[in-house]
Amino acid sequence: MAKIIISQLILCLFVILINVAPHSADETPPSLFILGDSTADVGTNTYIPESLVRADFPHNGIDFPNSRATGRFSNGFNSADFVAKFFGLKRSPPPFLFLLTLKPHHFQRHLLIGVNFASAGSGLLDVTGPKTMVVPLSQQINQFSTVKDNITALIGSEATETMLSKSLFFISIGSNDIFGYFATNTTIPKDQFISNLISTYSNHITNLYNLGARKFGIISVPPLGCCPSQRLIQKLINGADGCFQPENDFAISFYSALESLLTNLSSKLPGFKYSLGNGYKMTIDVIENPRASGFENVDSACCGTGLLNAQGPCNSTASLCSDRRKYLFWDLFHPTKKAAYLAAQTLYNGPPYYVSPINFAQLAEDY
Ligand SMILES: *[C@@H]1O[C@H](CO)[C@@H](O)[C@H](O)[C@H]1NC(C)=O
Ligand SMILES: *[C@@H]1O[C@H](CO)[C@@H](O)[C@H](O)[C@H]1NC(C)=O
Ligand SMILES: *[C@@H]1O[C@H](CO)[C@@H](O)[C@H](O)[C@H]1NC(C)=O
Ligand SMILES: *[C@@H]1O[C@H](CO)[C@@H](O)[C@H](O)[C@H]1NC(C)=O
């Protein structure tokens, strides 16, 4: 049962091309607050003792420094880490739940760099993800609110407002809600479900805005139906190869609705700025033309078991592909380190075709 829950949850990928000039060394990185699901989780769930949605065991982390399994659903760094790297940090700021284990002065020392609240298996909706095992987005925002109190206690409220208005809020979420829709026999029509997700997203973003956030770097969901786990369902249930199209259609609709929401919010909320990455386009372009970015396999998991290496999770007894740089997918749901790097690179410095109306580097600039 646990295994089923886990494979229904967690998350997918993102990708792309383009040359990047990273943040130059003499610029101070903006503080980085990261919220979302497994695409951005850097170990949150390993601090939830009862959570089964975790990746703190090999072969996860095989390409991480010292081959450490940190809880990231990846062979190495994930997109949150690479976004942080492009802004001049060494990796993502640590998980909030880890910071809570530190002594107060160590806790405080971390706050000005930023905090990562992302939790694998979580969604926009509180009903997404097994309760007590993941931190839903609403709760991640509550955690941010206490962090704001802690920063205020440290530097005062005026400096805190200034700092938060310059900080980057990176959000990667939505896939688990859509997987959830398909995993249950809900009778809610597609359009209604998407608009429910978007109005929930609107509340979350507005709550963050009311807490002082101004710069939002958001990535929409990838073509979910192309994950090895969903290709496997397509194969076993529908007897066909390829991606599960209904989920991809949801991903496309979700993007359009999110784009419209962000346009609306930016005309409503003074000082609100955003950059929206099109996770669907970034990834589908790689799937349709893998060699352009050096991939040779875009349908199977690098680490797993059985058909498409997607019939079991990535763990220490799973089979491991020989060249991880040639795979788009690390496990049945998640991108490889290389795919995560390409996605972050596109978010940071990509063209409007993939990230609009501006990219993350432009979002971070003061203008
Ligand atoms: C952080 O803020 C919360 C909420 O105000 C408070 O309970 C907690 O003690 C603070 N932690 C530190 C280390 O200052
Ligand atoms: C959904 O409906 C199908 C067919 O009616 C059934 O086989 C399946 O068990 C149901 N799934 C859930 C999660 O209720
Ligand atoms: C954005 O605003 C337009 C015009 O008021 C409205 O028709 C549309 O439904 C809004 N979209 C979202 C996602 O809020
Ligand atoms: C790895 O997962 C498989 C299920 O695919 C399970 O049978 C096996 O016991 C797991 N191995 C370890 C070391 O947990």
Image: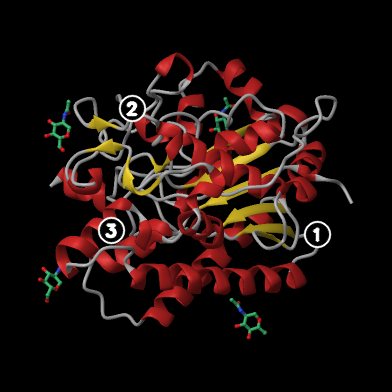
Task: Give the crowd class for mark 1: few <14, some 14-19, many >=20 residues within 10 Å.
Answer: few
Choose between 276 and 127: the one closer to the eye.
Answer: 276
**Percent position of residue 200, x then y:** 50, 67
Question: Which is nearer the N-term, disc 1 or disc 3?
Answer: 3
Quarter where residue 202 is shown: bottom right
Q: What residue is rendered at 50% in x and 50% in y?
A: 14
Q: What residue is rendered at 76% in x and 72% in y?
A: 267
Quarter where residue 75 is shown: top left
Q: Which mark is residue 271?
A: 1
Question: Which is nearer the N-term, disc 1 or disc 2?
Answer: 2
Dot 2 corresponds to which residue?
56
Question: Which is nearer the N-term, disc 2 or disc 3?
Answer: 2
| Amino acid on which disc 1 is placed | Gly
Query: Please, what secondary structure does the residue beneath circle 2 have?
Result: loop
Q: Which mark is residue 231?
A: 3
**Percent position of residue 145, x then y:** 59, 44
In the image: residue 259, left or right of residue 71:
right
Task: Give the crowd class for mark 3: few <14, some 14-19, many >=20 residues within 10 Å.
Answer: many
- Write down which quadrant ligand 1 falls in: top right
Q: What residue is rendered at 24% in x and 46% in y?
A: 310
Is residue 117 among what the camera can see? Answer: no
